[in-house]
Image (tube, rainbow, N blue to C red):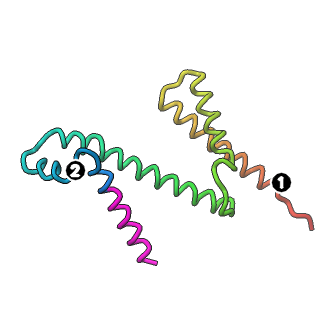
């Protein structure tokens, strides 16, 4: 089992290194950056590529955690946000915030609240209507 986690971590490191060094800026620019302190590479690497990679990793991790939580909460390995209404609830919350002219943070918060309300309603509806007859 530990080999599986090691392989996953290895693949993550390899793909991350590829994402950071692909394009016009590669290994030779990395070497010249540390030798001559070229500021162009520093701006591209530290201000653009690395934050984007960190954001992608955090978003992927949060999506996988939410998938595991959904599967555990509903005890269904095929559950998805579209089936539960999370996407529709989040869209509805975002549209309401757009209509009331909230900023970007307000729209994100409204989408989050709409998604949570949709999942809560789906869970409560399933909990109270799933009564077995003896």
Q: Which residue is mark 2?
A: 26
Q: How many numbered circles does the render carry?
A: 2
Quarter holding the C terminus is: bottom right
Displayed quadrant of residue 9: bottom left
Extreme residue in the right direction = 134
83 and 133: which one is in front? 83
Name the residue rendered at 41%, 77% in the picture: 3
Left or right side of 27 for 92: right
116 and 30: which one is in front? 30
Name the residue rendered at 53%, 31% in the picture: 107
Magenta residues, as a range?
1-16
Question: Residue 50: image x %, image y %?
Answer: 30, 47
For marks 1 and 2 on the same chain, the one whose residue lies earlier in the sequence? 2
Q: Main secondary structure of the magenta part?
A: helix
The reply to whether callout 1 and callout 2 are in contact (CB within 8 Å) is no
Question: Residue 61: image x %, image y %?
Answer: 46, 55
Q: Which residue is mark 1?
A: 129
- Image height of 66 relative to 97, above or below: below
């Amino acid at each position: 089992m530990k080999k599986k986690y090691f392989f996953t971590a290895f693949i993550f490191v390899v793909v991350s290194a590829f994402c950071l060094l692909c394009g016009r800026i590669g290994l030779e620019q990395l070497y010249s950056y540390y030798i001559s302190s070229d500021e162009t590479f520093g701006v591209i690497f530290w201000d653009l590529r690395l934050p984007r990679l960190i954001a992608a990793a955090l978003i992927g991790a949060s999506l996988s955690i939410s998938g595991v939580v959904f599967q555990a909460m509903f005890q269904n390995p095929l559950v998805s946000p579209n089936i539960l209404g999370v996407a529709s609830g989040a869209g509805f919350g975002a549209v309401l915030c757009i209509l009331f002219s909230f900023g970007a943070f307000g729209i994100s918060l409204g989408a989050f609240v709409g998604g949570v309300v949709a999942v809560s309603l789906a869970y409560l509806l399933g909990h109270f209507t799933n009564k077995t007859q003896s």
